[in-house]
């Protein structure tokens, strides 16, 4: 049956009705066979209340008494999906989606969540259109054994803090491992899952070693995996350098291309060149031996763990490496689907393609054309391989890593022979990596990736 959506109106129902009576549109009550004038259970998020339904000839409306609305956590103007299950005598409204965010600056009325504010408003608009409710909350609002939640929502043109029940579904957008690993955050996630059956997706960060070790367990994925290990000692560096003329050292918890070191053997001699990325740019150093390279980087190993990875002979545009970011999400049926794939071309003098380091975005066909794949057939073949790799790797993560993910940013590369390789998997893909956020000429446009998040949340909430 198709979904029904109601607008929530909070006002005293009638001097003849008590505060546990709700007024529902006659047509919706008839469609869902909601019994009138008898007690049923009404649920919104974790809250539930026995109510009596009376019907009225008003379109797509649910009128609730202020006392009941406050008790169950409903807010004026919400537009929610409604359904009734006779087997449990329950009328569910929602779903309520919670989003964990890193911080709130309540004094900034226009950008309370910093750079993620535009995304939060876009997600709010998508929920409003699709019959869901969404709220946003930082770590300080998460505590053990919660019965309700203080969270932010957008209504009547502004952001405000309100009280909500525990959401049906929670999407983890914490952008720091420090926040994610706070004891109160971990306890909150554990308690809402066990006590209320709340579904939490993208519940943790992935690190590079974890990803490659997990995917290596699936032989069908081996063709995508460059040789890659947790970097431990000089002997490992020496062994890898004997097999590959270019190596990469990548911080296992790094992001935005920061801290990556490229080591390249020069000609047939013993000398090596190392390029390293930092916030200041790219630093180039020359070393007379591999041991000298190791001595230079060994200090870093005391404060940061690195993944050592085989260098690849990647396609390029005018000498600038090209790679690809696939956004893979679960949709309305809970299955992995590709939302977008974009080409990323490294900036001049850079060997990583991150936009934060001067990289630029391109459509996949245009990026391949710049790499001298000059025929439509050649480009189509590689696009098919990129799409297959994206889905294969997402399913591999699902199978091999015991955590719940609803979206993944999968970074892929193509070598000069057309073979597809995995670079890394990001469980917190940036909301502005793939397409521009709303600008003046795309005002009120909701990206497919945001709609897909809401569809998956509805699937998880069984709404």
Image (cartoon, helix red, strand yellow):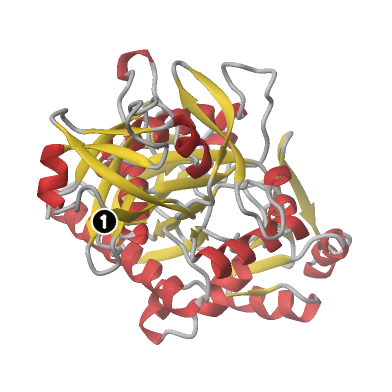
Residue placed at 22% from the left, 64% from the top?
A: 86
Residue 245 visible somewhere in the drawing: no
Looking at the image, which is closer to me, 71 or 122?
71
Q: Is residue 305 toward the left or the right of residue 268 in the image?
A: right
Task: Say which residue label 1 marks.
Answer: 332
Q: Is residue 77 toward the left or the right of residue 154 in the image?
A: left
| The C terminus lies in quadrant | bottom left
Q: Is residue 418 toward the left or the right of residue 257 in the image?
A: left
Image coords of residue 451 (percent x, y): 31, 42
> On screen, 418 above or below 100?
below
Q: Is residue 118 toward the left or the right of residue 357 in the image?
A: left
The number of discs equals: 1
Residue placed at 75% from the left, 52% from the top?
A: 178
> On screen, 9 above or below 179?
above
> On screen, 411 above or below 258?
below
Image coords of residue 186 (percent x, y): 69, 62
Image coords of residue 283 (percent x, y): 74, 42
Residue 362 visible somewhere in the drawing: yes
Residue placed at 31% from the left, 14% from the top?
A: 441
Looking at the image, which is closer to me, 346 or 327?
327
Which secondary structure lies at badge 1?
A: loop
Looking at the image, which is closer to me, 70 or 440?
70
Image coords of residue 331 (percent x, y): 29, 56
| Quadrant of the rendered image containing residue 177 | bottom right
């Amino acid at each position: 049956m198709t979904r029904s959506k109601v607008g929530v109106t909070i006002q005293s129902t009638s001097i003849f009705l008590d505060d546990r009576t709700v007024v529902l549109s006659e047509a919706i009550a008839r469609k869902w066979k909601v019994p009138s004038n008898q007690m049923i259970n009404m649920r919104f998020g974790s809250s539930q209340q026995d109510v009596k339904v009376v019907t009225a000839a008003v379109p797509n409306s649910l009128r609730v008494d202020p006392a009941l609305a406050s008790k169950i956590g409903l807010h004026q103007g919400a537009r929610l999906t409604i359904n009734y299950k006779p087997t449990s005598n329950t009328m569910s409204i929602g779903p309520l989606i919670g989003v964990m965010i890193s911080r709130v600056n309540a004094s900034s009325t226009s950008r309370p969540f910093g750079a993620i504010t535009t995304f939060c408003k876009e997600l709010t608009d998508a929920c409003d259109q699709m019959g869901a409710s969404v709220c946003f909350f930082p770590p300080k609002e998460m505590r053990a054994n919660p019965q309700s939640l203080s969270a932010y929502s957008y209504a009547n043109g502004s952001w405000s803090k309100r009280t909500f029940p525990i959401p049906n579904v929670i999407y983890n957008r914490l952008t720091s491992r420090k926040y994610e690993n706070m004891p109160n955050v971990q306890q909150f996630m554990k308690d809402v899952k066990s006590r209320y059956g709340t579904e939490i997706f993208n519940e943790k960060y992935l690190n590079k070693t974890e990803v490659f070790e997990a995917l290596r367990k699936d032989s069908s994925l081996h063709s995508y995996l460059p040789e890659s290990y947790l970097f431990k000692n000089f002997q490992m560096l020496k062994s890898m350098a004997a097999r590959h003329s270019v190596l990469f050292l990548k911080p296992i918890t790094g992001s935005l291309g920061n801290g990556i070191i490229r080591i390249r053997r020069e000609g047939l001699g013993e000398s090596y060149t190392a390029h390293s990325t930092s916030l200041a740019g790219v630093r180039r150093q020359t070393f007379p031996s591999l041991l000298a390279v190791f001595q230079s980087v060994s200090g870093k190993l005391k404060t940061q763990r690195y993944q050592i990875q085989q260098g690849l002979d990647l396609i390029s545009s005018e000498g600038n490496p090209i790679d690809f970011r696939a956004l893979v999400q679960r949709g309305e049926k809970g299955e992995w689907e590709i939302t977008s794939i974009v080409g990323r071309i490294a900036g001049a003098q850079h060997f990583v393609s991150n936009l934060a380091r001067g990289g630029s975005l391109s459509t996949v066909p245009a990026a391949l054309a710049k790499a001298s794949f000059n025929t439509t057939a050649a480009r189509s073949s590689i696009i098919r391989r990129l799409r297959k790799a994206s889905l294969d790797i997402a399913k591999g993560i699902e199978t091999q890593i015991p955590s719940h993910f609803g979206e993944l940013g999968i970074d892929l590369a193509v070598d000069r022979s057309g073979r597809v390789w995995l670079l890394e998997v990001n469980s917190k893909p940036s909301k502005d990596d793939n397409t521009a956020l709303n600008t003046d000429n795309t005002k009120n446009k909701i990206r497919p990736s945001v709609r897909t998040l809401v569809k998956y949340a509805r699937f998880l909430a069984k709404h």
